[in-house]
Image (cartoon, grey):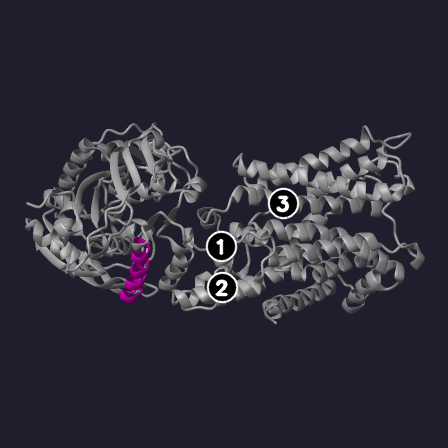
Amino acid sequence: MALEIRDIHKHFGSVRASDGVTFVVEDGSLHGILGENGAGKSTLMKILSGFYEADSGVVDLDGEVLDLRSPADAIQAGIGMLHQDPLVFLPFTVLDNFVLGSPGPVRLDRSSARAELERVGSELGFRLDPERLARDLTVGERQQLEITRLMSLGAKVLIFDEPTTGISATQRIQLFSTLHNLAEDGLIVLFVSHKLEEIEQLCDSVTVIRQGKVVFEASMPVPSEVLVEKMFGKIFVDEGREPAPLGAPVLELSQVTLEEGTTRVEDLSLDCTAGEVIGLAGLEGSGQRTLLRACAGLLKPTSGHLSVDGKNLDNASYRDHLAAGIHYLPAGRLEEGLVEGISIAEHLVLTSDDTSFFIDWDAADEAAQQEIDDYSINGRPSSPAEVLSGGNQQRLLLAMIPDEVRLLLLEHPTRGLDVGSAAYVWQRLLERRSDGTSIVFASADLDELLRYSDRIVVFFAGAVFAVRSAVDTDGEELGYLIGGKERA
Amino acid sequence: MKALRAATPTLVSLVAALAFGVVLLLLAGAPPFEALWLLVQGSFGSASKVSATLLAWSPLLLASAGLVVTFAAGLWNIGVEGQIIVGAIAASWVARSFPGPVWVILPATILAGAIGGLIWALLAGALKTYGGVHEIFGGLGLDFVAAGMVVYLVLGPWKRTGVASTSGTDIFREEAWMPGLDALGTGWPVIPVALGLASVLIVWLLLRGTRFGLRLKAVGRNPRSSFLLGIPTNRYVLGAFAIGGALAGIAGTVQATAFHHKLVPSISGGYGFLGILVVLLASFSAAWIAPIALFFVAISVGSTQLDLRLGLDSAFGGVLQGVIVLFVMIGGAWSARRSPVSPAARGEP
């Protein structure tokens, strides 16, 4: 038995999420799928589990070509997927969750379902109380419930998408031993992760995906540095950066603890001086966004102190933060930055200092045309935000930043932009920096972090794992640090 | 030109809806073209009929103008019916309680109606912003409360002299009636029409030319971005409710003091819900409200003739209105599927 994936293509707009992916996994193997955020791992797994339909390509199990149009098709064919957030209905009991989604007559036969749950559960070595509410289970137990359910549906391939997010160390050990057992019983287990250490610990073989393509396949063990290089590619940094002019501290964090959903950042202390650029590195969900949101005033620290220009902002509202000269640019340009259906001119009116009741549209159009020329936005004053390309949306957002800003917080400032647009964005940002504005930005692009930061703060699992001066580190080391390992 | 091009699918759908209405009439065994002609006759056939149509047009204009504001803020103000009712109750209270000449009572009833509607709308707004209750559910609940209140008043504290009746309270004394223009013979509803048209014009200007209107639109289309831009979103949501409620309340004043001259249980005349249909048809823009509302009330007023002359139930008017809205919605969805622009960009909440 083998799972064979041949030449899978899938694109979203102009993004090629899967670009001719081909690989084979033999039965009884614990196979790792490794890649950085946005490499195309999730898309591929969603194709295998029937959530997305591939544009082209073939999935073949036991020599049989599968027709995967929905998750139901995939489960029928024997492919089950455990999502990062287990798909469990919280208000339902364990038993009801178990029954849900299984084929059968209209009438529920709870007693035979209970017997089945107990039989499959005990084979797997799980102890699940059928009457408990899913809400009361830990994330690890919810995973066990999902595994039990998928196994009872006859899964031959189990896909685990970042299953160690949000579970404790002991649960992780238990999960790993379960995965070993499943593989020993002859199942194909696909373990999707961006954590090097876990892949090294667990997997028999690995496929590395970058930019929608398979770039590396091997049996484990493989030296870490090889995996890092395959994951991130070779990183070249041009030299000749001027060091940060040391100014007065603008942003000061002392022993800040932040909680947001499952992300918890503990005991963080960090200073950013005037004119300094700090890059936040780390995998998505490691705490960078949480930190940015706290600095912006969108998330109150549970403890510790946060101040800007010496002004304490522990209990200040978001608007107080704006007044203190903090400006936050989230990653979702059309979700959290611009307003669909509103034109460039209207956006600029919304953010202008003018407070007169009536709007002089002629003057507004003229001012907008000025900004369009200034920021080389490809659009007209009347163009609505959503028709602009990503790069032009980002330029508009830059044009909307008030003149008097002390601290700029940016989340993936150049994500999805072509090289020219990205360079332009940074040119404008660095102009701000020379005016004494501090910049803190999160990015998944190591090249960008190394090129523009003065210091790089690496997050791992909600904690600051390392702080490096950009001139003292390189892409290889960052790759290790992001994966939670010191360079050997 | 742009507005006209945007309205093209609407016009096509209107023709389709009328064709469907013809088919319905044929199925009902009525001569379709005579029936449609009767609709026109019944609403515009004589001076008094034109006057009646205009009087019905006014509260619909007021309610629709208010709804344009709440829709601009991304709100489904289902509570508009209740706001009309409470406005009418407040105006009736002034009309019943205070002596005085027309030029005192008239502005007082208008102001009372506006305040009544405003308070009722702010209740829905506060439930939404502070209580986390979706405005559709809050508004629907408040509609029922208002409907209960008016029945209680009509049958209880404000009951007719003699025996309580669902036909309404005592007629207000004449100084409390919204004066018509008797010089033209039939008591032309000049003040209601002026109020209605003024409300449409003001709302159009507000949304088109003011900072308040622009911010309101931004909040309606993307509250998240708006908040991050520093707009106090809750305040704008409440502001939209206040304006929408005040205009609905004035519609209530018109209903009580210009049409019924008393408080009746069905005081809202259904103009709130009809207003929602008007605004949907107008693609949420103030520019098209006036003609569409006139078209709708013409069907309502004219359909009474169907009953008298063809023995068709006047409910046919309502059926036709509903069919028109459904056809226009289908037309809108159809043209949306072919255009790459997102719903928000089309001006929908």
For label 3, the residue is: B78
Alpha carbons under labels 1 and 2: distance apart: 10 Å
For label 1, the residue is: A352
Q: Position of residue B30 (x, y in %)?
A: 78, 64
Quadrant of residue B40 within the rendered picture: bottom right
Q: Is residue A329 left or right of residue A365?
A: left
Q: Residues within 10 Å of mark 3 (few under 14, many from 20)?
A: many
Q: Is circle 3 on the same chain as circle 2?
A: no
Tell us which disc is closer to us: 3 or 2.
Answer: 2
Kind of residue at badge 1: Ser
Q: Position of residue A211 (x, y in %)?
A: 22, 60
Q: Position of residue A86 (x, y in %)?
A: 30, 41
Chain ID, mark 2: A
Q: Secondary structure at mark 1?
A: loop
For label 2, the residue is: A367
In the rendered image, residue A371 lying in the magenta stretch gets the answer no
Kind of residue at badge 3: Ile
Quadrant of residue A113 within the rendered picture: top left
In the rendered image, residue A420 lying in the magenta stretch gets the answer yes
Q: Which residue is located at x 66 percent, y 50 percent? A: B66
Q: Secondary structure at mark 2?
A: helix
Q: Which residue is located at x 81 percent, y 39 percent? A: B263
> Magenta region: which residues?
A414-433
Q: Is residue B103 left or right of residue B236?
A: right
Nearest the eye: A250 or A75: A250
Kind of residue at badge 2: Ala
Q: Secondary structure at mark 3?
A: loop
Do the residues under discs 1 and 2 have CB atoms within 8 angstroms? yes
- The quarter of the rendered structure image containing the C terminus of chain A is top left
Chain ID, mark 1: A
Nearest the eye: A54 or A187: A54
